[in-house]
Image (cartoon, coloured by chain):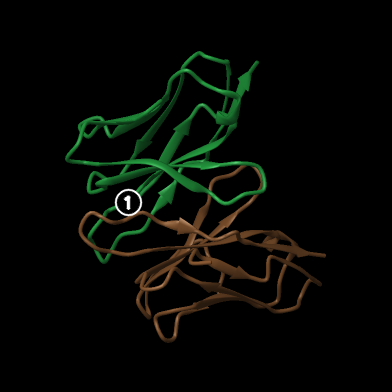
Chain colours: A green, B brown
Amino acid sequence: GENVEQHPSTLSVQEGDSAVIKCTYSDSASNYFPWYKQELGKRPQLIIDIRSNVGEKKDQRIAVTLNKTAKHFSLHITETQPEDSAVYFCAASIGYSSASKIIFGSGTRLSIRP
Amino acid sequence: DTGVSQDPRHKITKRGQNVTFRCDPISEHNRLYWYRQTLGQGPEFLTYFQNEAQLEKSRLLSDRFSAERPKGSFSTLEIQRTEQGDSAMYLCASSHLTQGDTEAFFGQGTRLTVV
């Protein structure tokens, strides 16, 4: 079955610097990769996603890259701000298939230092 | 509120008791997921439905856990003979499986404490 590994588990960066979180997946049939942000005591919320027919996607300060050959995908946050502090989860799924489910990584706790 | 709603938000139960949680997905979402989340961990997949059909149940899930979605709308998750290790946040999510639309929306969760 699908397995998603996420690194690092904790990350502390200076405000204004960039943060990078990396994930690997095991099932080569996976074709949908969402990223979720979870603030303390709140539900996970989607911040960006990418499909396997795209190598990179950007939304303002957030970007995601995908390397299907290596089965790696990464989240990049530039110009970090205090409100970026949260736990971030990557996930992988086989979209459009009745045999799909969303499997999450173990999370990265991002702290932005003022 | 048109988001995913879960009830109750909190549940404290004694070990050995049965508990049932309810999830109301976003209207017309045909896919519904249940996850379990413990402190410092990512959501752990439990089971999911496509309409009323339960497509998969995690192999890690004890037989004490059962889920239903009888009419393809709301879903219930029951835990029988609860154990302290069942204490966790139980999250429900829903999505609509159509071309280009796979985003899963989460509910606020039900926090279970087994004492």
Q: Where is residue A27 in the image (x, y as percent from the top left)?
A: 28, 46
Quarter occupied by residue B103: bottom left
Q: In this view, does A22 lie above or below B11?
A: above
Q: Position of residue A58 (x, y in %)?
A: 31, 30
**In terms of image quadrants, where is residue A5?**
top left
Q: Where is residue B102 in the image (x, y as percent from the top left)?
A: 31, 56
Q: In which quarter of the image is the C terminus of chain A?
A: top right
Query: In the image shown, does B87 or A21 lie closer to the viewer?
Result: A21
Quarter occupied by residue A95? bottom left
**Taking A32 as reference, is A66 above or below it?**
above
Classify B28 as above or below B59. below
Q: Where is residue B44 in the image (x, y as percent from the top left)?
A: 52, 54
Residue drawn at (66%, 78%), measured in percent from left and top? B80
Residue found at the very far bottom of the displayed protein? B71
The one nearer the camera, B89 or B82, is B89
- Rendered position, A96 above or below B20: above
Mark 1 crowdedness (10 Å alpha carbons): few <14, some 14-19, many ≥20: many
Residue at 60 percent across and 59 percent down: it is B108
Residue B58 visible, this orientation = yes
Q: Determine the secondary structure under disc 1.
A: loop
Give the farthest residue toward the left.
A53
Name the foreground residue: A30 vs A27. Answer: A30
Q: In this view, does A72 lie to the left or right of B22?
A: left
